[in-house]
Image (cartoon, rainbow, N blue to C red):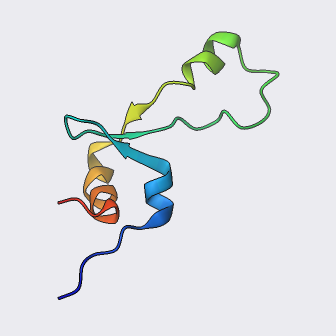
Amino acid sequence: MPKMKTHRGTAKRFRVTGSGKIMRAKAYKSHILTKKSPKRKRNFRHETEVATGDQKTVARNLGLR
């Protein structure tokens, strides 16, 4: 059976930490920023962990598990 290929779109959007967590960037930071507070925009910079319901799908697309 051939090797699983990594889904390139998924590989560009997610990263895996050393402990195995799958991290993603936050949404809503691309445009219409004038009405958003500086604190809110600052918090968009940080990554968050992928939701538990999506972890299996993302991991499969990344070629993990």
Q: Locate residue 45: give its quadrant.
A: top right
Pinpoint residue 3: horizontal percent, then vertical percent.
Answer: 24, 79
Residue at left offset 77%, top offset 26%? 33
Q: Locate residue 64: give its quadrant.
A: bottom left
Pinpoint residue 17: horizontal percent, then vertical percent.
Answer: 29, 37
Q: Nearer the viewer, residue 45 or 54?
A: 45
Vertical relation: 30 (above or below) 1: above
Pinpoint residue 61: horizontal percent, then vertical percent.
Answer: 34, 64
Pinpoint residue 51: horizontal percent, then vertical percent.
Answer: 33, 42
Q: Is 59 placed left or right of 33 in the picture?
A: left
Vertical relation: 20 (above or below) 8: above
Report the quarter where the N terminus lies: bottom left
Q: Is 13 placed left or right of 44 in the picture?
A: left
Q: Is 14 placed left or right of 30 in the picture?
A: left
Residue at left offset 61%, top offset 16%? 42
Report the quarter where the C terminus lies: bottom left
